[in-house]
Image (cartoon, helix red, strand yellow):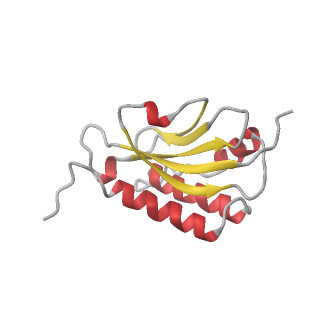
Amino acid sequence: MSTKRNYDIYVAVFKGIPMDFCKFRHTGLWFYPDEGTEECYVHVVGLTGEFEFETRLGWDPANTVSFAKKVKVGTTKRSLTTSELVALSQSIPVENRNPEFNCQQWVQRALLALFKNGYITEEEYNNGVNGMIDATMEAEDETLP
């Protein structure tokens, strides 16, 4: 049985490929445990209409070439196991029938679920969503008219 622990929560933001535009920036949730276990990264990956949930244990998003920014959300207010964290994340709907759906929307909904389940505060939820939006707006190839 896994040990319950608290996690620092971050939104990991990656540069867009092939061009670093806001809409191409990829996002996911990065959970860093307070002690003794590997970090956990969750996200939806794929093309529009074909997104799939993915979990990566022991993976550090900052060690990738496309990593752009780590946005601090907060720390879980209640302890939980990695399995519980993954199950909660996996319960967030992947809306492949919606052509507007993307990974950024999924992260927003996952943060909302963490808030509604008492793991983060409303302020942390808002800071996470706003920080993610700010980080996506920092896309290097985006030009303003």
Q: Residue at x 54, y 68 (%)?
A: 126
User: Residue visible at 61% across and 62% down?
Assistant: 112
Task: Give the quarter of the image for residue 81.
Answer: top right
- Residue at image position (30%, 55%) is 138
Query: Left or right: 66 with respect to 111?
Result: left
Q: Nearer the viewer, residue 14 or 101?
A: 14
The residue at the far front in this view is: 35
Where does residue 45 sit, x and y in percent of width and height?
48, 39
Instruction: Answer above or below: position of 64 versus 117.
Output: above
- Could you tell me how many numbered marks the image carries? 0
Q: Residue furthest right?
A: 1
Viewport quadrant of the C terminus = bottom left
Left or right side of 96 for 15: left
Q: Is residue 123 above or below residue 18?
A: below
Instruction: Report which quarter residue 122 is drawn in.
Output: bottom right
Residue 133 in which image quadrant: bottom left
**Image location of residue 66, percent across then percent down:** 36, 36
Left or right of 136: which side holds 124? right
Looking at the picture, tell me which residue is in the foreground, 127 or 133. 127
- Front-most of residues 45 and 74: 74
Point out the image quarter for the N terminus: top right
Nearer-the-camera pick, 63 or 19: 63
Q: Give x and y (percent) for residue 93.
A: 60, 52
Farthest residue, direction left: 145
Q: Residue at x 62, y 52 (%)?
A: 92
